[in-house]
Amino acid sequence: MSLSAHLKIRFVAAGTEPAQAALAELVARYGQVSRDVAEVIVALGGDGLMLQTLHERAGLPIYGMNCGTIGFLMNDYAVEGLHARVAAAEEAVLNPLAMRAGTEDGQVHEALAINDVSLLRAGPQAAKLRISVNGVVRMEELVCDGAIVCTPAGSTAYNYSAHGPILPIGSDVLALTAVAAFRPRRWRGAIVPKSATVRFDVLEPEKRPVMADADGRSVRPVLWVETRSEPTISHRILFETGHGLGERLMREQFV
C-alpha cells in the first residue's frame, strides 16, 4: 500500500444497529469526508455490505470492519489506530465476473459479480443445462438444482457450500460447480482458465425454468447465460497485515 498515515476516510455502514453505532463512533473520532475526495472507504457491516460497496465504488481501496455475522471479507472491528492499520494493510485486487443472460422476451441482461454467477432452478423440477467452454460443448446435459461459476474470492461462499473447491487468491482459474447434480451423478465440477467464457444453455426452459444470479442481481427466466472474468475492472480490498485474503483462503481449507 502507498496510503499515507493521514488518510481521507469515507465511512459507509449497513443499516443494522451495531453497524450504525460503529459509524457514529468512528465518525466522531476520525471525521467524515465526501466521496469525491476520499482516499479509502471503510465499510462497517458484513460481507453483503462489502460486496455492495465494491460494486458501487470500483477503484477505491475498501477496508471492511465486521459488524455483521460471518465477515469473511472483513477485518475485526476496532476503534483505535485506524489510520495506521489501514495504511499498513495488505491489498488484494479482484476482477469480477461479467454475466450476460438472455431471456424469453429477447432481451440480454448484463451484470457483474465479485463472488459468483449462479443458475438455479426456478420451478419444482430440476434444471437441465448444456455447458460450453470457449464455444466447445463440454457437457451435453447436466441435470441439477443449479450451477455456479466463481472467482477465487467467491470460492468460500456459495461454491464451498455446494462442495466446490477453494481457489488460491491470485490464481488464474475459475471454479465451475454443480448444485445437487442428479446426472451425471458423480460429476465433481471443473476448473477452467480465468480467460475462459462459460456458457449455459437451458434445456426444456418452459418445463424446467431457470433463474440466473450475479451477486444478488437476479434475472428470470433465462434461456442462456454466459460468464467470463472482466480484466478491465479491478476491485481493491484491504486486510490487516498477516491476515490477507490468501491466508484466509488457506486457513479455510483446514477447518
Image: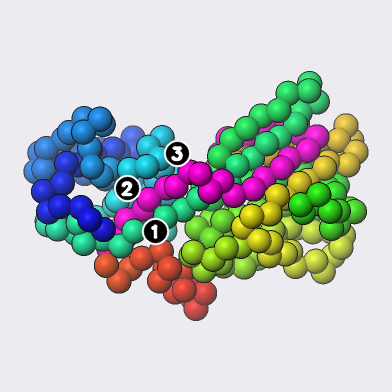
Mark number, residue 55? 3
Answer few, some or many: residues within 10 Å of disc 2's Cα (few below 14, many 20 plus, some between 14 and 19): many
Q: Residue at x 82, y 69 (%)?
A: 186
Residue 161 placement (x, y as % from top left): 60, 61
Q: Residue at x 21, y 33 (%)?
A: 37
In the structure shown, which secondary structural element does the residue marked by tag 1 occupy?
A: strand
Q: Which residue type carries mark 1?
A: Ala
Q: Which residues are magenta?
A: 215-240
Which of label 1 and label 3 is nearer to you?
A: 1
Q: Are marks 1 and 2 in contact (CB under 8 Å)?
A: no
**Which numbered disc, 1 or 2, marks the residue that appears first in the sequence?**
2
Residue 80 placement (x, y as % from top left): 12, 56
Q: Are marks 1 and 3 in contact (CB under 8 Å)?
A: no
Q: Which residue type carries mark 3?
A: His
Mark number, residue 92? 1
Q: Residue at x 76, y 46 (%)?
A: 199
- Camera sees residue 123: no
State left or right for residue 140 relative to residue 60. Answer: right
Which quadrant would residue 171 be assigned to in this image? bottom right
- Camera sees residue 24: yes
Mark number, residue 109? none
User: Disc 2 designates what residue?
Assistant: 62
Q: Residue furthest bottom?
A: 254
Answer few, some or many: residues within 10 Å of disc 1's Cα (few below 14, many 20 plus, some between 14 and 19): some
From the image, give the main secondary structure of the stretch colored magenta. Answer: strand
